[in-house]
Image (tube, grey):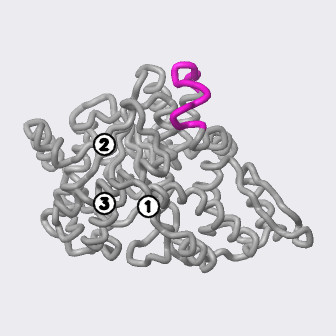
Amino acid sequence: MDNKKASEKSSSQKMDNQEASEAIDALSLTASSSNPSISASQMSLEEKFKIVRSIGEECIQEDELMNLLAKKPQPICYDGFEPSGRMHIAQGVLKALNVNKLTSAGCKVKIWIADWFAQLNNKMGGDLKKIEVVGQYLIEIWKAVGMNLEGDQVEFLWSSKEINSRAHEYWPLVMDIARKNKLPRILRCCQIMGRSEQDELTAAQIFYPCMQCADIFFLKADICQLGMDQRKVNVLAREYCDDIKRKNKPIILSHHMLPGLQEGQEKMSKSDPSSSIYMEDEEAEVNVKIKKAFCPPKVVEKNPCLEYVKYIVLPWFNEFKIERSAENGGDRTYTNFEELAADYESGSLHPADLKPALSKAVNKILQPVRDHFKNDQKAKDLMKRVKIIDVFHEF
């Protein structure tokens, strides 16, 4: 890595914990949805920056983000997903929270429905019709959970349709990215597909990173708002800007990856349904999964239950309620993670009290999704089609 790239990597600062906490506490789902108390036009530059920056565990680069927000009234944020199976709570709830924060700060969010990419990655057996059904199903979940889709600030774009309609723009870009990178550099991006460099990849899967890199420019994205697992291809896009002498690079805003619920699981695994909460899980399933989750007493680090509280419950409700008997300390309401972590580490908050409270909060978030798929005819029909193609066993 040359000095410039090393410097760029080292200067991707992590936000001060207190500042990030304040930013998140200030924006619950309700506050950032269809009736925000303050419109983006009324916000100061610093307020916009704090909201947008709070989304990312890492930002490359913060000064570029500040400059973008100062100069462009409606920055374009890019996010994307493969319609490849069940939606876990991080994809469902975290994405809704992040999208609502971005739109509240005046951004336009383009969500790339990567159906061709799912086909390249051999998801749903490479059947594009099945992949489309799953994509529609996942969009329906976001509508139900509370993603703010009013107005034109959020746009869902199907990759197959967009690429076909502007093929003369897209494919020369993909080819140029491929020409300017050696095969080992592309292979290092395989993590974005849930693969590793050691996997036996098809030629189609080698196209994937070049295409995803091209997506960023094709969509005219100012900000890449994806998970930390997509970081390598986003960095590839910035390196490509150096290759073509482009001054304005896409800003990388990488959000935190929630771990699996079992011990040692750094991320949720579709091969292990017990490792995560899914958006269509019933109340009893949620209760069992959280009851069995790894949650060692007095240990905050790498504790998945605490991570669910920090990244899902507190941003959603702006509080976390513990209900317990007076003998065990009585009820307690936390409004920030630092107080919760301190009590847990000291032992004054026990897993036996934390887990039921977490189950109750998660079920409250998921109930509107359950109700929607029970009462809305379009959603019910989608659910039937999804079950016919057996997506719940597509791991």
Is residue 383 within the magenta segment?
no
Q: Is residue 7 visible?
A: no
Please tell me the numbered disc located at residue 374: 1
Position of residue 250 measured from the top left corner of the image (x, y, whole percent): 35, 37
Local SS, label 1: helix
Residue at mark 1 to residue at mark 2: CA–CA distance:
24 Å
Please tell me the numbered disc located at residue 381: 3
Q: Quadrant of residue 262?
A: bottom right
**Residue at image x 35%, y 51%?**
139
Question: Residue 7 versus residue 307: which sits nearer the camera?
Answer: 307
Q: Earlier in the sequence, mark 2 or mark 3?
A: 2
Amino acid type of disc 1? Lys
Local SS, label 3: helix
Q: Are marks 3 and 1 in contact (CB under 8 Å)?
A: no
Q: Main secondary structure of the magenta part?
A: loop
Q: Earlier in the sequence, mark 1 or mark 2?
A: 2
For the record, the magenta segment spans 31-46
Please tell me the numbered disc located at residue 156: 2
**Residue at image x 42%, y 72%?**
269
Q: How many numbered marks are there?
A: 3
From what the image shows, is residue 275 above or below residue 186?
below
From what the image shows, is residue 96 above or below residue 373?
above
Position of residue 332 measured from the top left corner of the image (x, y, whole percent): 82, 58
Position of residue 17 measured from the top left corner of the image (x, y, whole percent): 66, 47
Question: Residue 244 versus residue 283: which sits nearer the camera?
Answer: 283
